[in-house]
Amino acid sequence: MKPNVLIVAAPFGFGPAARSLNLAEGIKDVAELTFFSDGDAYRFIEKYKPAASSCAKGIFAQAFVAPEALKLFDLFICVNQAPAFGHLGKIGRADRSVFLDSILRWRTEVAGASVKGGLAYLAEDYPGASQHLDKSAARHVELIAPLIWPRLSGSPSPTRSGIALHLGGATSPLAPWEMMARPIETLATQAAELARRHGSSLTIIGSAHLKRLQPLGDGVTVLGDVSPELSATLIANSVVLATTPGTGAVNEAMARDTPIILLPPMNSTQLLHYEVLTHHGLAGVLERDLARRMSEVGKTVSWGQQTQFCLKLWSEQTTRLFTLMPQMFGDLLNEKTLEARNRALSAQRRVLAGLSQRSAIEIIRELLAG
């Protein structure tokens, strides 16, 4: 009889849902799967979950108040969902829990003492992110490799074409469409113009809200939210990926040798990611003074207020945010020289090589086998 696994995904954005589905694909042959989430993540998981799995909706601590409600499950996986992991600790089930997140100190503080005594595996998104973890308060934490989206068979197309614009984190509940519509439309319009200037196509993916964009002309396809497999295919076969600094799209591009242009961060987690990745040599669109301001905010402003800074940056500095994009696209799309492209790929390979090479799926399969 297969063990029962409950995968709890944070409701915000595309990343937690994609990570949860990736995990499910990796263990669906050895476990019975149930997903639990809310918001956009629930809708995405419900749409793309494996055929034999189920998906429930709501707030975890309210749905599972007593330990008896969780006795059905043999293992719990919390994806970017510290409150769920904290609740499992309070009711005595942290010893059968896996916590996958960005290795940010504030998340482990939210989870509380349960991280100290339980079976807590955390995924380090990028080299350097773990410096924000209070390791003395997490003696049983083991750093593991990032969750790359489902690997596809074969290699990327030898004849890559088109630009991929990924905005999965740009329209989460933390960044409501009403606030972000104008800057996102500005970005999409500029990306479409750059694609046409270089004789390329543009595909925009990552959020259902993107379907509200005004028509952008020939050569532009707006797909909104798509399956992780299709996202992986589009990224693997694109000449360039422009994306907010989340986890799924960036890691997939690094694994597929697709050059990345980092868009401004949309929230506090992405603010850290932007700084870590640009420090490692990835190309970011922010001008030097804006990048410096962002770095100062990351060091001096409380975590809860950092997202508001990012949103204000997008809404108040829209005309300045993307002034470096034309040159960056031009460098990476120039067929006469490969210097910029090779420089970008070298930096991305160094970042990927700096992570643990042991996969989350491998560890979870071992736990289930035990």
Image (cartoon, helix red, strand yellow):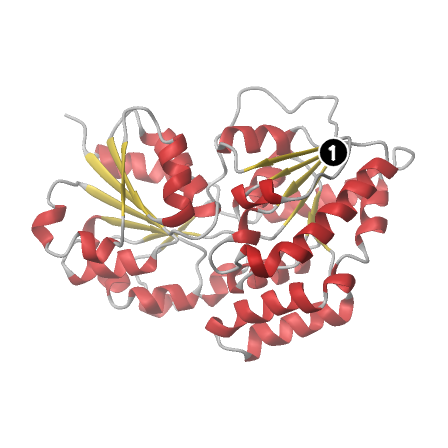
Q: In this view, does 124 lie to the left or right of 209?
A: left
Observer-nearest residue: 243 or 170? 170
Question: From this viewpoint, is residue 48 visible?
Answer: yes
Q: Is residue 358 visible?
A: no
- Secondary structure, mark 1, is loop
Q: In this view, does 202 lie above or below 267?
A: above
16 to the left or right of 199: left
Q: Is residue 366 left or right of residue 310?
A: left
Q: Residue at x 51, y 74 (%)?
A: 305
**Which residue is rendered at x = 76% and y = 45% of the image?**
191
Q: Characterize the local packing of mark 1: few (<14), some (14-19) or many (20 or more) Cα atoms within 10 angstroms.
A: many
Which image quadrant: the C terminus?
top left
Identity of the residue drawn at 39% across and 53% down:
80
- Which residue is farthest right? 336
Image x and y of residue 122, in percent: 38, 53
The residue lying toward the viewer, choosing from 97 and 186, is 186
Label 1 sits on residue? 239
Among the 4 quarters of the image, the one containing residue 258: top right
| Residue at (43% x, 53% y) in the render | 12
Indicate the quadrant where residue 337 lies.
Answer: top right
Amino acid identity at mark 1: Val
- Asked if residue 110 lies left or right of residue 89, the reply is right
Looking at the picture, how far across and down is residue 184, in whole percent?
Answer: 66, 52
Q: Which image quarter holds the N terminus?
A: top left
Depth order, front residue of 31/230: 230
